[in-house]
Image (cartoon, helix red, strand yellow):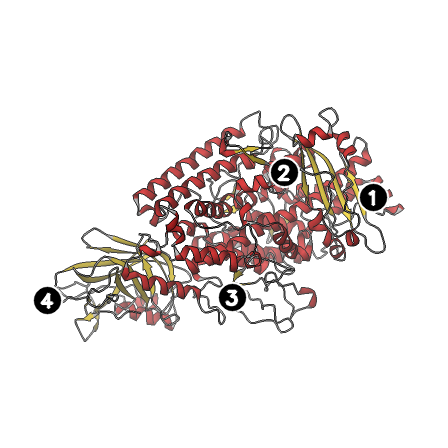
């Protein structure tokens, strides 16, 4: 790329052993290093020293110059070059340190050479290791910068060790305008793996047209590097971002039953794109990619070491690769249920002995909430914390009030809609699925709301609400019922908004399509006043809740946050330079998402993974999320206001707070979420308007336009021709697009993720799967008699098995946890934001609003008039409180989807 000016003032280098401390002399650098343990033992009374050749940049005699010292901070890492205490590469790296050839730094001018019109040659110098403190190592190098070199805009770095290193930052001291900092926070591969030098820009942001002339070429070449060429298998040290379909979930070479359809790239299975890994294709299905234990993600997308070693990745790996296999060894009967509800309670009060856990000695530290040492025993116990829902009210899960309340203030507040048309009717083909009309009738509704208002009044006044999984699940009923130990229905639930703004459940409808020579079966269940109807209602709710749990995990959570965000990350790195202001605004919202998505493909959403084995609709789970993507997902409805309006839960009203009037005034998720949305949008507005003064600046930003085009046509390419994609022509357009992405990665994800253990940790409250049919579906005489004799046994048989329940509870505990180094929205700022006083002030206003939101939410949870978040045994709604401590807390909104 550039030829570098480097002057070596000595041609010889001297090594020697010292029996006294090194004393530097004029013109000569010397320093000590910490030799390996065995080396120190052998030469206990001597030190190793080195007089290197002085390496400095020089200027001609006619120029004045300034002496600049570069200080490089490198983090000690377990996986990087500083971790290896033995081996040939470590010895070679010790020698490199001795020779002062650990790092080559080259400073790049922002200006072109006025004589040639080309980039000025970078000025280079080798850095030598100086100090080690608090887990960080410092390297220093000296430059002499001519006064006509111009403003420094970037630093090129070459890692001359044999292992990668993690660069924290680079600071140039001695410049006329004060220190110049380059925030790196990046892995730099060894030059023996990747000979191309890494580039780090200053913290000042530039639109493409504003890029200093000396940085334009390097800006463009860095983007080209990140795009790659789309060829070959990716290596772990690479930073290449490219697209691929979801063709790595199945294992067709293992068994035909383990094959899964390719998601993405077809009309049948539309899907967002993932990051390309380039692994070989399967032999039996050349459209499917082979699987591997280590899934490639670009190197800087991987977890930080704090997250990796002390929390998220470690705990998830511990759960997946140690705890779950130990459970499977202990519970050999995969269909075994819980004979009594008291047996379920033992999971929390006493735990179960799992002998195989003891051999994994790290588990007590990795999963302290779950794995406990047993006194006077060689075993470990798997014991779960009692979820806050059950701590407050042990029987809340049994009550209709809680069933309804959680649709507004629970784990999945995204499914409920206003009933706008009557009668309810399916859009599926009646020739295949039977009559499309719902069995929920006007007369049934009027019977349930008698004394409040007529059916017509309820419909007109928007008092009727529905959660409708009929059309999304019904096509899978026949397939799922062929699987062992599970069943499925199409389902709907209807609710009525009572005068105190709480929801009253009116009915649950379960539907089975024609199958096995039998006609369509559909039944409506309502809260009953006699024993049989009451128990059938409880069982119908159990089936519906299993559907809701599956839809929440697969669509509201995985699809709409994790999966749909990955294309935004890929496009941002391929099309927006690291010095682009929009890249710097979005980057903290993308941190670690690709890594956690790769882990999901490895063990959660893969064939026979946790989702398929324990959630409805079983092996068709991720396939069903593809159907939901095709039918339901629209970018223009992913912002909170647009989502509420599309579901009939709000209407535009300039006289109401947030410009919206809620259909259900006491809707905790929406009320708290709109405050968070407004804060996000105001911050994004301040930021965008600072860099884009008018529409022409948006339209002329080539990187920005390429970014938005690639998101639509590649990342979400199966929907590239949809008319609803927002245009990107004005700052207002950009504000809405960016605010939506920020909301999805922060508020949306927090609302559906961090309450998982609190609301579903006691699995009867939100069973993830239903295992037997309703007792009144084609009942046998013996079966009906068993139900009448002891209906509790029917409920226990319907709930997840012991194996399914313990596996799900383990995973939900981990997924609900905050890492000790969690970065919460508004709590941590970015160096580039701090570098500009106007942006810094805007962020401080944003952070202040979020602190105010904490207090507002606390006050709402104490308001006796808000019955959906306050009352006897009611869990306060805190999922959108911005800040939290580490662990399972049921609150806290991180910047990104990192778990």
Residue 290: percent from left, percent from top: 58, 69
- Asked whether 621 or 472 is in front, the reply is 472
| Quadrant housing residue 663 | top right
Indicate left or right for 25 with 307 as reference: left
Q: Residues within 10 Å of mark 1 (few under 14, many from 20)?
A: few
Which comes sooner in the sequence, label 2 or label 4? 4
Circle 4 sits in a helix, a strand or a loop, which is it? loop
- The secondary element bearing badge 3 is classed as loop
Camera sees residue 375:
no
* Residue 618 position (above or below residue 552): below
> Residue at horizontal 43%, vertical 37%?
850
Residue 225 is left or right of residue 507, and the answer is left
Check disc 4 and report the residue beneath it: 61
Say few, some or many: other residues with alpha carbon within 10 Å of mark 2 (under 14 / 14 to 19 / 20 or more). Answer: many
Secondary structure under tag 1 reads loop
Q: Tags 2 and 4 in contact by the CB under 8 Å rule? A: no
């Amino acid at each position: 790329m550039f030829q570098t000016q480097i002057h070596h003032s000595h041609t010889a280098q001297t090594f020697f052993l010292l029996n006294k401390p090194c004393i530097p002399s004029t013109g000569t650098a010397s320093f000590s290093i910490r030799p390996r343990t065995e080396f120190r033992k052998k030469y206990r009374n001597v030190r190793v020293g080195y007089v290197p050749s002085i390496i400095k940049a020089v200027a001609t005699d006619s120029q004045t110059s300034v002496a600049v010292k570069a200080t490089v901070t490198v983090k000690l890492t377990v996986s990087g070059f500083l971790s290896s205490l033995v081996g040939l590469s470590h010895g070679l790296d010790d020698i490199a340190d001795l020779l002062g050839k650990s790092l080559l730094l080259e400073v790049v001018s922002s200006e072109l050479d006025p004589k040639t019109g080309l980039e000025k040659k970078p000025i280079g110098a080798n850095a030598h290791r100086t100090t080690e403190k608090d887990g960080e190592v410092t390297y220093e190098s000296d430059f002499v910068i001519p006064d006509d070199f111009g403003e420094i805009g970037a630093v090129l770095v070459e890692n001359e060790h044999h292992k990668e290193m993690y660069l924290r930052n680079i600071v140039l001291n001695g410049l006329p305008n004060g220190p110049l900092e380059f925030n790196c926070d990046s892995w730099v591969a060894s030059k023996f793996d990747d000979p191309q030098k890494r580039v780090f820009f200053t913290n000042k942001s530039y639109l493409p047209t504003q890029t200093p002339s000396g940085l334009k070429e390097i800006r463009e070449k860095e983007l080209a590097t990140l795009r790659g060429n789309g060829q070959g298998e990716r290596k772990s040290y690479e930073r290449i971002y490219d697209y691929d379909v979801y063709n790595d979930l199945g294992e067709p070479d293992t068994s035909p039953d383990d094959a899964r359809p390719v998601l993405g790239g077809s009309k049948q299975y539309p899907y967002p794109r993932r990051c390309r890994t380039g692994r070989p294709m399967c032999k039996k299905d050349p459209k499917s990619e082979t699987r591997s234990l280590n899934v490639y993600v670009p190197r800087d997308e991987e977890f930080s070491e704090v997250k990796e070693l002390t929390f998220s990745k470690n705990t998830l790996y511990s759960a997946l690769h140690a705890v779950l296999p130990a459970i499977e060894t202990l519970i050999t009967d995969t269909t075994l249920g819980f004979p009594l509800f008291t047996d379920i309670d033992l999971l929390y009060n006493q735990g179960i002995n799992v002998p195989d856990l003891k051999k994994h000695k790290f588990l007590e530290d990795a999963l302290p909430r779950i794995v406990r040492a047993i006194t006077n025993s060689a075993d470990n116990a798997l014991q779960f914390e009692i979820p806050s829902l059950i701590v407050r009210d042990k029987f809340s899960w049994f009550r209709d009030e809680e069933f309804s309340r959680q649709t507004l203030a629970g784990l999945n507040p995204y499914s409920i809609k206003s009933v706008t048309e009557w009668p309810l009717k399916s859009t599926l083909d009646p020739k295949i699925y039977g009559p499309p009309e719902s069995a929920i009738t006007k007369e049934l509704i009027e019977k349930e709301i008698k004394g409040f208002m007529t059916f017509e009044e309820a419909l007109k006044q928007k008092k009727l609400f529905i959660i409708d999984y009929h059309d999304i699940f019904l096509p899978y009923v026949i397939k799922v019922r062929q699987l062992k130990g599970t069943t499925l229905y199409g389902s709907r639930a209807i609710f009525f908004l009572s005068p105190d703004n709480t929801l009253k459940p009116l009915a649950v409808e379960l539907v089975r399509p024609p199958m096995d020579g039998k006609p369509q079966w559909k039944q409506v269940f309502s809260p009953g006043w006699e024993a049989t109807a009451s128990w059938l209602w409880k069982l119908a709710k159990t089936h519906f809740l299993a559907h809701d749990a599956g839809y929440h995990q697969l669509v509201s959570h995985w699809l709409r946050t994790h999966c749909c965000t990955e294309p935004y990350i890929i496009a941002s790195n391929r099309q927006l330079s690291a010095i682009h202001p929009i890249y710097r605004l979005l980057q903290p919202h993308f941190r670690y998402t690709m890594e956690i998505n790769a882990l999901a493909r490895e063990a959660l959403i893969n064939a026979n993974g946790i989702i398929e084995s324990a959630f409805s609709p079983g092996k068709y789970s991720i396939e069903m999320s593809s159907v939901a993507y095709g039918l339901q997902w629209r970018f223009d409805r992913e912002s909170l206001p647009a989502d509420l309006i599309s579901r009939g839960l709000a209407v535009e009203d300039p006289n109401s707070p947030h410009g919206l009037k809620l259909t259900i005034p006491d809707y905790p998720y929406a009320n708290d979420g709109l405050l968070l949305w407004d804060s996000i949008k105001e911050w994004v507005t301040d930021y965008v308007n600072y860099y884009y003064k008018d529409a022409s600046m948006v339209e002329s930003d080539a990187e920005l336009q390429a970014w938005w085009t690639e998101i639509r046509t590649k990342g979400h390419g199966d929907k590239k021709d949809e008319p609803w994609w927002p245009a990107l022509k004005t700052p207002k357009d950009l504000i809405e697009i960016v605010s939506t992405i920020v909301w999805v990665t922060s508020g949306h994800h927090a609302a559906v993720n961090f309450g998982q253990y609190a609301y579903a940790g006691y699995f009867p409250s939100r069973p993830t799967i239903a295992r037997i049919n309703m007792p009144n579906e084609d009942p046998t005489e013996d079966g009906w008699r068993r139900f009448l004799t002891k209906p509790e046994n029917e409920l226990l048989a319907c709930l997840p098995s012991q194996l399914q329940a313990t596996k799900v509870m383990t995973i939900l505990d981990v997924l609900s946890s905050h890492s000790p180094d969690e970065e919460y929205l508004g709590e941590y700022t970015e160096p580039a934001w701090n570098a500009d006083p106007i942006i810094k002030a805007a962020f401080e206003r944003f952070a202040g609003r979020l602190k105010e939101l904490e207090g507002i939410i606390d006050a709402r949870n104490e308001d006796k008039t808000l019955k959906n978040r306050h009352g006897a045994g009611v869990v306060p709604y805190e999922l959108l409180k911005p800040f939290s401590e580490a662990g399972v807390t049921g609150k806290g909104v991180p910047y990104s989807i990192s778990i």
